[in-house]
Image (cartoon, rainbow, N blue to C red):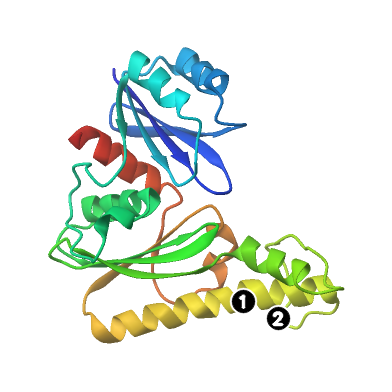
Amino acid sequence: MQTTLCFDFGNTRLKCAVFINNEFKELLVLNDDSVLSIEDVLHQYQPQKSILSSVINHNPEIEIVLEKSTTFHKLGPTSKINFTTPVGKPETIGADRLAICAAAVDLFPQKHILAIALGTCITFNYINKLHQFLGGSISPGMYMRFKAMNEQTALLPLVKPTLNFPLVGYNTATNLQSGVILGMAKEIDGIIDLYKEKFDDMQIILTGGDMEFFTPHIRNQLIADPYLLYKGLFAISKAN
């Protein structure tokens, strides 16, 4: 039995997915990027392998800890991946986008794929059937939009998202929720429509921590997979 820990350090949360053999088992949320936090996870799961995807300036000492205790790989421009990146500056591609694309190609080989990740930002990631990641687009995510309206106005409050809100908001909070969530859902549908006009037989995948708020409101058919990024990290760990 082989255990692999797949660490994902994003702008909002620090997470770790646990894979035993080839199967995803559970997702952990870490309190911080301290050595103690990493050592606690290592002690609990006794992994043989680990991989780190980070888009933040994390504590560099944790890489030393992971290297001592496991066969460790840090996801980056030199990682072996199952797709090519014929873009202007491939070294600038975020580690999270690399992992998402790796999972998409692994699950849907030889297809046009649009993988949409809903996190701090929305990223639209297009991989063609030749397994070339050609880029996509980035726009503000849900919490960023709520926060911007609060910070850049005098009176609008900072509200939390909810699964139940009306189309026609009846107070300030529901107006903001309707505007952000439905506005983003229509943005996502609109971008998908543009891709479908250009590319035939395309697979659409939705993922990310904020996914649950949007799946009821998107009309395009797609596959929703909250663990897509971690499946990509695991696939990359096997290749490296």
Residue bearing the label numbered 1:
182
Front in this rendered view, residue 123 or 195: 123
Going 46% across and 24% down the picture, which residue do you hit? 62
Q: The disc labelled 1 sits on which kind of residue?
A: Leu
Q: Secondary structure at mark 2?
A: loop
Q: Nearer the viewer, residue 15 or 171?
A: 15
In this view, 82 is above or below 65 = below
- Residue sitting at x 77%, y 77%: 175
- Above or below, comparing residue 185 to residue 5 in the picture: below
Secondary element under disc 1, as helix, strand or loop, is: helix
Q: Position of residue 15 (x, y in %)?
A: 51, 37
- Image quarter of residue 152: bottom right
Residue 67 horizontal/vertical position (percent): 34, 20
Q: Nearer the viewer, residue 130 or 57?
A: 57
Tell me how far mark 2 sits from mark 1, CA to CA.
Answer: 8 Å
Q: Residue at x 22, y 65 (%)?
A: 87
Of 10 and 161, which appears nearest the observer?
A: 10
Say the numbered circle drawn on residue 167: 2
Which image quarter is the C terminus in? Answer: top left
* N-terminal-most mark, 2 or 1: 2
Please identify the quarter of the rendering in which residue 217 is found.
bottom right
Quadrant of the rendered image containing residue 213: bottom right
Task: Say whether residue 219 is visible.
Answer: no
**In the displayed structure, does residue 13 sit left or right of residue 230?**
right
Residue 88 position within the rendered picture, expressed as x and y whole percent measured from the top left: 24, 66
Q: Quadrant of the N terminus?
A: top left
- Percent across and percent down for residue 119 are 52, 57
Query: Vertically, is 228 above or below 9?
Result: below
Can you tell which mark lies on residue 215?
none
Mark 2–mark 1 CB contact (< 8 Å): yes
Q: Is residue 157 visible?
A: yes
* Number of marks in picture: 2
